[in-house]
Amino acid sequence: MSKYRELSFICAVAACFAAAPVYAGKFGLGRAAQADEIAAWDKDVSPDGSGLPAGSGSVEVGEELFSDFCAICHGDFAEGVDNWPKLSGGADTLDHEDPLKTVGSYWPYLSTTWDYVNRSMPFGNAQTLEPDEVYALVAYILYSNDLVEEDFVLSRDNFLDVEMPNRDGFVVDDRVNTEYVAFSQPPCMQNCKETVEITMRAAVLDVTPEETRARQIKEMIKATNPNGKQKAVVETAAVQPEPEAVEIDPVLIAAGEKAFKKCKACHQVGDSAKNRSGPVLNGVVNGAAGAADGFRYSKPMSAAAADGLVWNEQELTAFLKKPRAYMKGTKMSFAGFRKDGDIEAVIAYLKTFP
């Protein structure tokens, strides 16, 4: 018996005892559950909003709570840490070969988010959040997916006003009528096909860590600077015929590589980088805005590019501090780096990808 069927069986047995007091007398097991006891377990929230408790929570409060309770696994901006789930990003990727399924890109009902956070989070300390805190956390998750503004307050009254992007992306499960019949016949156990041939082979991808940029810089230092100074000279791909040499601190690069993990859910860098929900960032430092080939930028970004915006360090710093304040209407779901040191480090890291 699978763990899901086993759980269903246990719940069904429990329901029988709770709903039919006669079993308690017949088998001498327990007693009928009282109404308040059943209510304490009844936490179900449906897509139509039924089951939602009174309460409200703002994006601002949710950001603080998310940092305290959720960021250790899901990242400060819901971008995910290591193999923990990404909760934001992935817009317009469901038709890709490798879609990014998040709350914003995939989940059809907001009630699923509220119900799951309320039942199961924080990890290891489930069902300790008050309704107002759950509303605030869900509001921040919506904000991280660029679905609400930063001054948004979620409550039971406006819960159904939030439309999830993939709300029409699911179909009714009709497998009982369309598929079950085909799989309920006696199975063929021998001579089922005249010939058997291998048409595809499985391949495990992305399991071997790539050489990090910071390590490459450090190895270059060892080879070219035996005195072990903490500066490396890196040639940048400037437009001039003779590229200028720029000094970059490898310690800062390493810090930038670490901070860039908050960006990797949407952006890639390096020789094999591809556009995802965000554009490739090779050559972005001191490069023209909106210049990634094949990426569909937002209207505000396209307008800024047409006006000649160049991502020098000053402009990048302002943008990475708070993207939505810098450019109203940007598609970037990232809320911004809180520490100026992280911004400086990320820019230094991006400089190594001309």
Image (cartoon, rainbow, N blue to C red):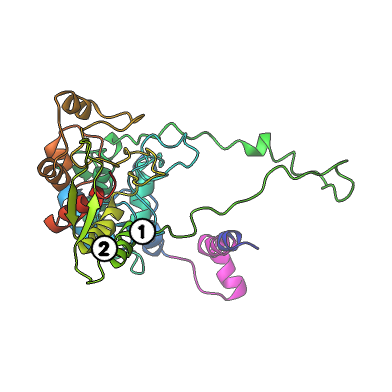
Image quadrant holding the C terminus, namely top left
Residue 255 image label: none
Q: Main secondary structure of the magenta part?
A: helix
Q: Which mark is residue 212?
A: 1
Compared across the picture, whether 111 is left or right of 320 comes to right
- Nearer to us in this view, 129 or 343: 343
Residue 198 % position (x, y): 74, 45
Compared across the picture, whether 318 is left or right of 186 comes to left
Question: Could you say whether the residue bearing mark 1 is in a helix, strand or loop?
Answer: loop
Q: Mark 2: give few (<14), some (14-19) or many (20+) Cα within 10 Å.
A: some
Q: Which is closer to the viewer, label 1 or label 2?
A: 1
Residue 21 within the segment the image draws in magenta: yes
In-image side of 288 versus 105 (left or right): left
Image quadrant assignment for residue 152: top left
The x and y percentages for residue 274 are: 39, 40
Residue extending farthest front: 242
Q: Amino acid at mark 1?
A: Thr
Q: Residue at x 75, y 39 (%)?
A: 182
Q: Residues within 10 Å of mark 1 (few under 14, many from 20)?
A: few
- Reading the image, the residue beneath label 2 is 69
Is 45 one of the magenta-colored residues? no
State how far apart marks 1 and 2 are (Cα).
30 Å
State the count of labels: 2
